[in-house]
Amino acid sequence: MDNFFGFHLVTLSDLVTPWKSFSEPIAWAEDGESWKTARVKLEVDAGDFFGLFLRLKSPALRNGHGFLLQTEFQPDEKVKSVIALERVEWKVGHTNSAIGPREYHFLDIPSSHIHKFEINYIEGENRMRQRNLPLAVPLDPDPGALEDFLDCAEKLLRIKGVSGIGRPGFQGRLVS
C-alpha cells in the first residue's frame, strides 16, 4: 500500500502478528530516582520493518513493583512521534476509560494487565484509538514472580528472548 507521496504505508497489524527478536542488546538507563528504562530495536522474523522497538521500564529499587514492556513503531527517526502497539504491565493497576467497545468501559484492573493491540486498534483507519493505549484486560492468571511475567509477556508480545530479561542493577535506598 502506497500513500500519495509514493512511500510504502505499513499496516500496523503486520507489525504485531509475527514473532520478533532483539536486534541489539538491552542498555538500561536511569530515568529519575525510581525507574530505569531501555529501548531496543526489534527484528521481525517474517520480514524487515524499520522502526519497530520494545520499550522497557523497571523499578530501580529492589522491592519495587511494576515492570512495563511496550512494542512501538516509529516510522521516521527524524520525527519523535511513536505509535504504541501493545503493552503489558506487571503488578500495576489500570482503569479503562469509556472509549471503544462498551464491554471494556471502566473495567477496573487491580494488578497485571495487557493493553491488547486488537482492542486499541481501529482497523478501518489503520490507527490506534489513542497514543496511550487506553483499553486493557487483566492477565489471568496474574503472574506472581517477575520471571513468570516475562514468560507470559514473551508469548503475548511474540518477542523471542523476553523471558530472559532481568531487572537492571538495583540501587540502594538511603534511610535518614
Image: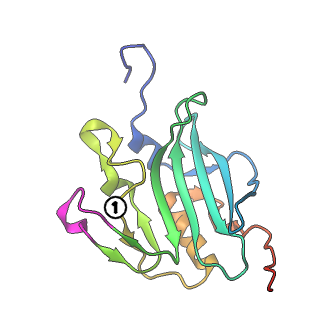
Position of 150 with respect to 110 (left or right) is right
Residue occupying the far top of the picture = 5
Q: Write the start and end of the magenta stretch as one range.
A: 96-106
Residue drawn where x is 56% and y is 64% of the image: 68
Q: Which residue is at a point 66% across and 60% down the rendered structure image?
A: 161
**Residue 16, x across and y down, in percent:** 45, 48
Name the main secondary structure of what is drawn in magenta.
loop
**Residue bearing mark 1:** 135
Of residues 142 and 160, the one drawn nearer to the viewer in this rendering: 142
Percent coordinates x, y for residue 146 in the rendering: 62, 77
What residue is rendered at 54% in x and 66% in y?
A: 153
The x, y position of residue 11, in whole percent, is 39, 36
Depth check: give the residue in front, 157 or 104. 104
Q: Quadrant of residue 9?
A: top left
Q: Nearer the viewer, residue 111 or 9?
A: 111
Q: Which quarter shows the N terminus?
A: top left
